[in-house]
Every structure is written in structure tokens, then in C-alpha cells.
Amino acid sequence: MIEIGKTIVEFPPLREGVLVKRYKRFLADVELDNGEIVTAHCANTGPMKGVLWPGGRVRLKYCPSPKRKLDWSWEQAEVPSHNELKRCWVGINTSLPNKLIRNLIEANCLEKQIGAISIIKAEVAYGRNGKSRIDLLLEPEASNIDTRKIYIEVKNTTWCDNSLALFPDSVTIRGQKHLKELMSIAITSRAVLIPCISRSDMEIFAPGDLADPLYGKLFREAISKGVEVIPCSFGFFSDHITWEGVKPFQHSQNI
């Protein structure tokens, strides 16, 4: 098990620079510290509310490949923080949270919440019409008291209000659908929503009611029907990511 505050993922040091602009959803121009301006792929296609700061510091991964159109990928952004540090690095790559949560499960960091796990599968078809794909499907060890399969939906969470982490940051039809799908399987299986809080300065999670009131309504309905919520927090650095523990959650953005 990885202790809180310890490294869960390591990687070659990222390059730092200043965000010039983000455009066409998938592209970002960044001026590196040596003055060179490069175009990076932006895996986050959402509005990036509270994270998109032209003129702010960002971190990029350099990964040239004949299979890629761009050699650079935007990974992190520095943003204002509510705490005494005043600044915080945020993970903005939406393809990373699933890997982080899988690493947590494999390291037994969530054993208290979900029990011992024997098999982990990714992107398994499920839902009312079998047309959705769950991020992670877990099969518990036979020794567990609860041996039901566990369906986990992971959501990258970067928007916040002071120390309150919020998802979503805009209307998300896809996110609404995922909550409905989790509710549909909660009768016979364990259905789990994991907000992946990709910043270390958050203390609690809530649905982003102000951005998507319907999502907030479905969130509360899902909980009433047995869907579990396990917010997991991480810290982002230039060459590693740390595990910052499971955070509590509240049922609405405004209480």
C-alpha cells in the first residue's frame, strides 16, 4: 500500500513554459522557457473552467513519434489556490485518471473502500443497452464478504470553489448518461463513481450543480439508489504524481 503523500507514478521531467493560447479544443500554443513556441496536444476537450489561464505556467511532455501529429502534450497547469501556498499544479490530461485509479487499486490503496480485488478489466461494455463502456470492472477476491462485481466510473475533477472540488464544469450529457447507467446496475452489482481530484489543495468533493443542475440532481438520485462515491485526490509535480488520499463528499454544491 502506498502511503498518503508518497509517489504513485514517476515519469521523465516535464518541460515548463507559459500558455499563449488554447484553440480548436485540442491545441495549445506554449512558449517554453527557452523562448521557443510549440504547439501541444490538449487531451482535455472541456472548457477547463478555473484551469485555463493564458499567461500562466504549464508543463508539457515531449513525446515525438511517427504516429503522432504533435511532439508535445499538455499535462499540467499552475493555477491560483485557496491555501497558503497560493499556487497549485493541476493535472489536465483526461486520459490519465483511469491509470491513476487503476494504480491505486493494484497497490491496495482502496482496499478499505472496495475490498481485495482479484481481476481488473478496462473499457468493458455494460449498461441498459450494452452500448456504454465502464472505465474499470473489478472482480473481488473470493474471500471478500461482498463478492459482487464492482463497476467504476472515473471523472477527472479540476474545477473548484475554494477548497471544494467540483465535477462537472459544464453541462455533460455523457456524464448524465453514466450516472443513469450506474443506477441501472446498482441493484445487482456495486456501482462506484470515483471523482479523480487532480489537484492536492482540495478538501471535499461535490457535484457541480451550478454548471449542470441535472447532473447534480442525478448525482443525488444515484446515491439514494446505492451508487457509491469515492473521491480520490492526487498531487502533481514535474516528474511524479503523489497519492493524497480519499476525500469526503457532500451531496450538493451549495449546502
Image: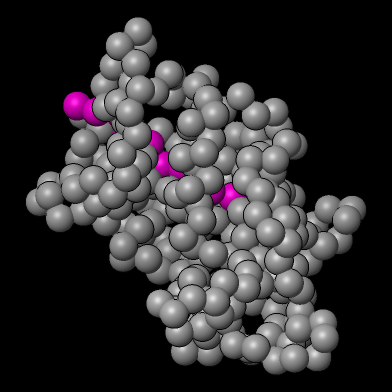
Q: Is 194 contained in the magenta span? A: yes
The coloring applied to the image is one colour
Q: Residue at x 64, y 35 (%)?
A: 245
Place of residue 197 in the rendered image (x, y in percent of width and height, measured from the top left): 59, 50
Q: Is residue 135 visible?
A: yes
Q: Where on the picture, by quarter, is residue 17? A: bottom right
Q: Is residue 51 visible?
A: no
Q: Is 30 contained in the magenta span? A: no
Horizontally, residue 189 falls left or right of residue 20, namely: left
Magenta residue span: 188-197
Task: Report the front residue among 85 and 98.
Answer: 98
Q: Residue at x 20, y 40 (%)?
A: 184
Horizontally, residue 60 falls left or right of residue 186, namely: right
Horizontally, residue 116 falls left or right of residue 70, namely: left
Task: Report the front residue among 94 and 181.
Answer: 94
Place of residue 158 in the rendered image (x, y in percent of width and height, measured from the top left): 59, 60
Quarter of the picture containing the N terminus is top right
| 194 to 143, vertically: above or below | below
Horizontally, residue 132 falls left or right of residue 58, namely: left
Q: Where on the picture, by quarter, is residue 141? A: top left
Q: Where on the picture, by quarter, is residue 75? A: bottom right
- Looking at the image, how many numbered discs can be counted on the residues? 0
The furthest residue to the front: 66
Q: Residue at x 73, y 62 (%)?
A: 13
Place of residue 23 in the rendered image (x, y in percent of width and height, measured from the top left): 53, 89
The furthest residue to the left: 129
Magenta stretch prevailing secondary structure: strand
Place of residue 217 in the rendered image (x, y in percent of width and height, measured from the top left): 37, 51
Q: Residue at x 83, y 53 (%)?
A: 83
